[in-house]
Every structure is written in C-alpha cells, then in structure tokens.
Amino acid sequence: MKIKLNWDGVGIATSLACAIHCGLLPVIAPMLPLLGISVSHNGVFEWSMIGIAFFVGSYSLYHGYIKHHRKYSPAILFSIGFVFLITKQFYLSLETIFLTLAVIFIISAHYKNYRLSQKSNCSSPHHKH
C-alpha cells in the first residue's frame, strides 16, 4: 500500500502553523517564564522553519510544474511570499505585516498549484499512469 502525500496541503498547513506561531508567541511568551520556559525570538528556530517552508514549497511547486501543469504562476506567487517571509526577519517592527503578506502569497501559490495540477488530468509526458 503506497501512501500519497499532498505536498500542497503540507505547504498550506506549515504556512498556517507559522502564522499561528508568530501570532500567538507574543501573547503566550510573557507567561512561559512562570512555567520555567524561556522563549524569545530564537534565530535558529525561525530560520529552520523558513528552511522547512522553502523545502516543502519548492518540492510541491516543482512536482506540480514538472508532472502536471507547466505554469509559472504558482512559483511567482511563492517567490513573492518568500521575499516577504525573509524580509520579516530583518524588519521586526513590521513583522506582522510582512508575515501576513507572506502567508497570503505562499498559501495562494500552493492553492493555485493544487488547482492547476487537478485540472491538468496528468497530461504531462513525464507522468506515469
């Protein structure tokens, strides 16, 4: 039995998890020292999450492009979103704005990739039936 993973779904889920993490951290962080947990903007964690988002997104979009639709629009949306995601790391005072834009563009890229892949009926010569 072979399990087929929907990488666009994984990409959307990781984007939403990132947004929730960044949105809730400022609310929850002040309470964590009461529990003996010290949390701040951890650079290693942040860049690791960005790396995972890049890997999942790139793989998903590459797969959709090569195997299904040959359209650049998902990659363009993803790239714009990723620029906002990286930018938020350097402009902390505007982090919420850049994160919101990043999540909107990255989720849009995955959704567009998913829709184009579904619409293609796998007509690519690279697809094995």
Image: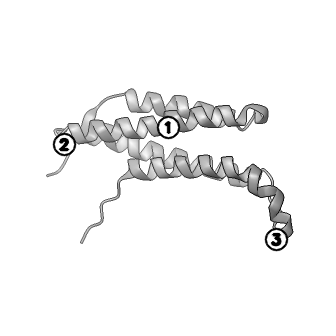
Distance from label 3 to label 2 (Cα)? Answer: 52 Å
Identify the residue shown where x is 72% and y is 38%.
89
List x then y, in percent, for residue 44.
72, 53
N-terminal label among 1 and 2 = 1
Q: Quadrant of residue 94?
A: top right
**The one of 115 and 83 positioned closer to us in this rendering:** 115
Image quadrant where one finds the N terminus? bottom left
Q: Quadrant of residue 4?
A: bottom left
The amino acid pointed to by label 3 is: Leu
N-terminal label among 3 and 2 = 3
Badge 1 is on which residue?
Answer: 106
Disc 1 element? helix
The amino acid pointed to by label 2 is: Cys
Disc 2 element? loop
The amino acid pointed to by label 1 is: Ile
Distance from label 1 to label 2 (Cα)? Answer: 23 Å
